[in-house]
Image (cartoon, rainbow, N blue to C red):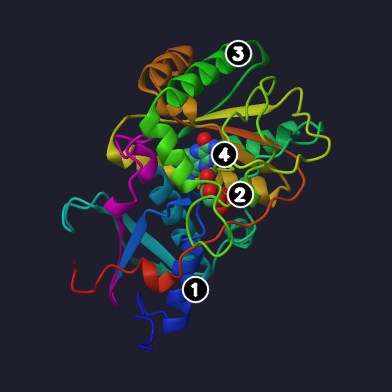
Amino acid sequence: MEPFPPALGLSSEQTEQLLRLAGAAPSLHNRQPWRFRLSPESIELFCDPRRRLPAADPDDRELRVGCGAALLNLRIALAQAGIRPDVTLVPRTGGPWALAHVRVAEHADPAPPESELFRAIPVRRSNRRPFLPDPVPLAHCQALVRAVQAEDCWLHVVERSQLGVLENLVRTAHRAQLDDPAFVAEMLEWTGRGPGEVEGVPAASAGPLPEPQDQWVLRDFSGGQARIRLPGKDFEYDPLLLVLCSHSGTRTADLEAGQALQRMLLTATSLGLVASLISQVTEVGEVREELRRLLGGSLHPQAVVRVGYGTPAPATPRREPRELLVDQAGA
Ligand SMILES: Cc1cc2nc3c(=O)[nH]c(=O)nc-3n(C[C@H](O)[C@H](O)[C@H](O)COP(=O)(O)O)c2cc1C
């Protein structure tokens, strides 16, 4: 087999590991819509249009959010390898699918907080199970807010008085999506996957089968399969819900939101917290507008995240780094 193409002065093995860590990012239905072109001077990030999810994500916003999360992993892994990266988002060159161009800014030792995030990359998981009743300490919540702000985005901590309105919005969006045969078909295709698959959400990651009284985790990721009920399946009474927002609605802002989301999820992981996303409310256009109005009208809601303490969730599969390479000739 050909050696893995090296980039940015790293060895072949280091570059392969770099892409493995970038590819450990979360993505809608685990479609892993990122691709990379490597050269000695740069790493280019592209989105893969074959991995679009047009029913859930017609504008490719979440596709870019996922790619932004992969970019944050790449930045953290580069820092760990002693490279401070210089990143250009949505570069003019590289064609319509180019999302970022990464070069070496300087060589420097990694800062200790970044090393903690680095260690969190392979152990972060989406956790759709009920969380424990223990509240998230205020200092942890503040750390999540700072993580998001460090990536030029905004984190709204949902107040108790807003929980009822948000729950109604989630239910409205959920019903609208279930009424859409294209959405249901897409969801069935990419969830409830068996062992041996390299993309999509495995049935084992689905969490308990949603029930009518459940408030937040409404999506069935089992692909419609009956599953063994988890014991003690009551969801937390007082969840910590966070709305991650960007300051504008551009493609660049979507990538910033993805990086902010991932910095927040890695921070949560390093603090011993678990998280899952509740995306119905940001996927259905009119409902997203209502959420936007609820937050004052100027921010752009990008992701709703539930955070708490939980029991371990299984890892989801990933494609091999080699499969993430754009043909080096640029095809
Ligand atoms: C933009 C985006 C939206 C997502 N929406 C949801 C969601 O609504 N519900 C959910 O349970 N997981 C959601 N996820 C999580 C993915 O399903 C998850 O990242 C993927 O299956 C890989 O699993 P992992 O996060 O455990 O690595 C979302 C992820 C991203 C990046």
Mark 3 touches mark 4? (CB < 8 Å):
no
Residue receiving disc 2: 203
Amino acid type, mark 4:
Gly
In screen coordinates, is 190 left or right of 268?
A: left
**Earlier residue among tags 2 and 4:** 2
In screen coordinates, is 218 left or right of 287?
A: right
Question: Magenta stretch?
Answer: 38-63
Residue receiving disc 3: 162
Category of crowding for the residue at label 3, using alpha-carbon neighbours closer than 10 angstroms: few (below 14), some (14–19), many (at least 20): few
Category of crowding for the residue at label 4, using alpha-carbon neighbours closer than 10 angstroms: few (below 14), some (14–19), many (at least 20): few
**Earlier residue among tags 2 and 3:** 3
Amino acid type, mark 2:
Ala
Q: Residue at x 71, y 47 (%)?
A: 271
Q: Where does residue 328 sit, x and y in percent of width and height?
A: 23, 74
Q: Residue at x 48, y 41 (%)?
A: 188
Category of crowding for the residue at label 1, using alpha-carbon neighbours closer than 10 angstroms: few (below 14), some (14–19), many (at least 20): some
Amino acid type, mark 3:
Gln
What whole-number distance in Å separates the C-alpha atoms at marks 2 and 3? Answer: 32 Å
Secondary structure at numbered mark 1: helix
